[in-house]
Amino acid sequence: MNKWALTACAAVLGGLAVQAAAAVLVVRSSGPSAKAYPAGKAVPDNSKINLRNNDVVILLDSRGTRTLRGPGSFDASATSAGSTSALAALAGNTTARRRVGATRQPPTGATAGRNVWQADVSRSGNLCIVNPTDTGLYRPDADTAATVTIKESGSGRSAAVEFAAGQRNADWPKDLPVAPGQKYEVRGGGKAVTFATRSISPVPAGMEGLAQRLIVNDCQAQLDVLIDTFTSPTAS
């Protein structure tokens, strides 16, 4: 084999090695080093992440997430084990995917009580869809009964969903099937909001693939749920 062929093989193998090592995904960052670690950046799992004062970086891989707080130098791969059942749900069948978020320990924060495939009726933004029949609704304030009306902007069709007092979750209305590439106006969830639907089917393999799709499609509310679902202890 001549030197040019050897060089070409080395380049290909080197590229494959880099891809194989890039198994950790930055899902959120803030602080002075945020530009060096933007959301969506793949970081080689054998690398060090050097953070300054006031830096916060959240990493995600197949084992879960980890929050890094600067200053300090951290191993990119040192995430803790995630929930096996939740991991299986992300990569598994339709029924399992609907349960993502319900299989973990009691959640905390703004995303408590909902799963990745539910639309928050109090928050405007993009809504990523894998299987339309998996899509549901969530409301953070469930103190009183409420009627939520969903209107499809393109057709003008609408449907109502009844929430009982104490009820946070509901199915998307069957008489107005959710479809990708549409806009939906939602009223009755506390304020008027709008969803713009984006298809990410087929669902990517692993949490990193799903997180990457949510980031690229700017489905921030669902990304928040994914991060909260698999959050592990903070490193600082």
Image: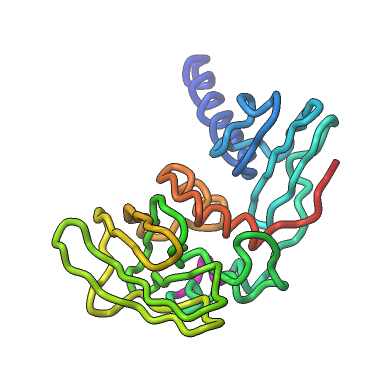
Q: Is residue 89 magenta?
A: yes
Question: Seen from this angle, which residue lies furthest left?
Answer: 155
Please give the range of residues in magenta.
88-93
The reply, left or right, for residue 151 in relation to residue 119 is left
Q: For this rendering, which residue is in front, 93 or 141?
A: 141
Q: Residue furthest top?
A: 3
Quarter of the image where the C terminus is located: top right
From the top left corner, tell me how far across and down residue 104 is, in percent.
Answer: 67, 72
| Residue at left offset 35%, top offset 78% | 161
Residue 141: x and y, percent?
A: 55, 69
Name the residue rendered at 83%, 45% in the picture: 235
Main secondary structure found in the magenta portion: helix
Q: Is residue 183 above or below residue 72?
A: below
Image vertical order of residue 188 relative to residue 45, above or below: below
The residue lying toward the viewer, choosing from 106 and 59, is 106
Viewer-proximal residue among 234 and 187: 187
Q: Is residue 109 above or below residue 16?
A: below
Compared across the picture, whether 233 is left or right of 205 comes to right
Residue 197 placement: quadrant? bottom left
Q: Is residue 226 left or right of residue 233?
A: left
Compared across the picture, whether 30 is left or right of 155 comes to right
Q: Position of residue 189 (x, y in %)?
A: 43, 66
Q: Residue at x 39, y 73 (%)?
A: 134
Q: Quadrant of residue 108?
A: bottom right
Residue sitting at x 68%, y 44%: 58
> How many callouts does the rendering have?
0
Q: Position of residue 106 (x, y in %)?
A: 71, 72
Q: Is residue 134 magenta?
A: no
